Amino acid sequence: MDAKPRLAVHKFSSCDGCQLAFLNQGAELLQLATLVEIVHFAQAGFVAPDATVDMAFVEGSISTPEDEKRIRLVRKNSRYLVAIGACATAGGLQALRNRAPGGAGWIAEIYPQPGHIHALPASTAVSAHVPVDAELWGCPVNGRQVLDAVRGRLFGVTPVVETDKVCLECKRQQGVCVLVAHGAPCMGPVTRTGCGALCPRLHRDCYACYGPAENANTQALGRRLADLGLSPAAIARRFLSINNAATAFRDAGDRWQEEDHGDA
Ligand code: SF4
Ligand code: SF4
């Protein structure tokens, strides 16, 4: 019998939430373990970080010199590499530090011994350092998408990367629009789907954790948020959140920050 494909899940600078999304698949994950050999997944108890594998999932941004060195090794050891979650696909929340005025001066304001902090000048996506075969967005990534990517790969199929807007999924789920009906500052019109429109279905506005959708009209949504009464600073914060370093959101956030004249 042929050997089972070998799989690894690597953590970089991150909160572990995307690995949990994997683990939370429960019975389905156990079933998957009959099809692949999990050789490295520290959170599940498998530790072999330098192993050569057929498929590697990478969680986390590249934020330290150690991360930078290790991601090159992971790439070299992996036939197929998938970046999972907002940190790995866009630098994550921690990329906000890239925008700090005065460079890394903030480190000394937070840490009593800044000399112990060894960070790169910026937190960046995995794709800024090595070629990536697929990206699954979200904070955290959706466990269903991850398992679909593994199953697809087993059959030689490229994972389906969803790029539609959350609004489309929201309407498919017959949700009442919280932006239109309740005037909530929903980011669904510019955010990529994949979560099943989780927040609007619970009557809450989307805060864009899946990053920019394809052809996101950030200008129109920004104007709509202004009409709702949000200040330029508040609109900038809507864009400059979990996916602040994703190009469409970064550019929109920059524009609204320029509009901000200190009116909160
Ligand atoms: S609630 Fe949000 S995601 Fe749903 S249709 Fe309205 S704007 Fe779009
Ligand atoms: S609705 Fe928006 S904020 Fe909520 S899970 Fe989906 S993408 Fe994330």
Image: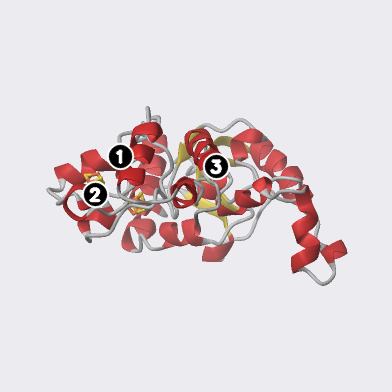
- Mark 2 CB in 8 Å range of ligand 1? yes
Residue at 37% over, 27% down: 215
What amino acid type should be assigned to the residue bearing mark 3? Ala
What amino acid type should be assigned to the residue bearing mark 2? Leu
Q: CA distance from mark 2 to mark 3?
A: 26 Å
The circle drawn on residue 179 is: 2
Query: What is the x, y in percent for residue 120?
Result: 76, 47
The circle drawn on residue 90 is: 3
| Disc 3 secondary structure class | helix
Residue at 43% over, 57% down: 22
The front one of 89 and 130 is 89
Task: Return the residue found at the far bottom.
Answer: 112
Task: Return the residue found at the far right.
Answer: 115
What amino acid type should be assigned to the residue bearing mark 1? Pro
| Disc 1 secondary structure class | helix
Query: What is the x, y in percent for residue 246?
Result: 52, 38
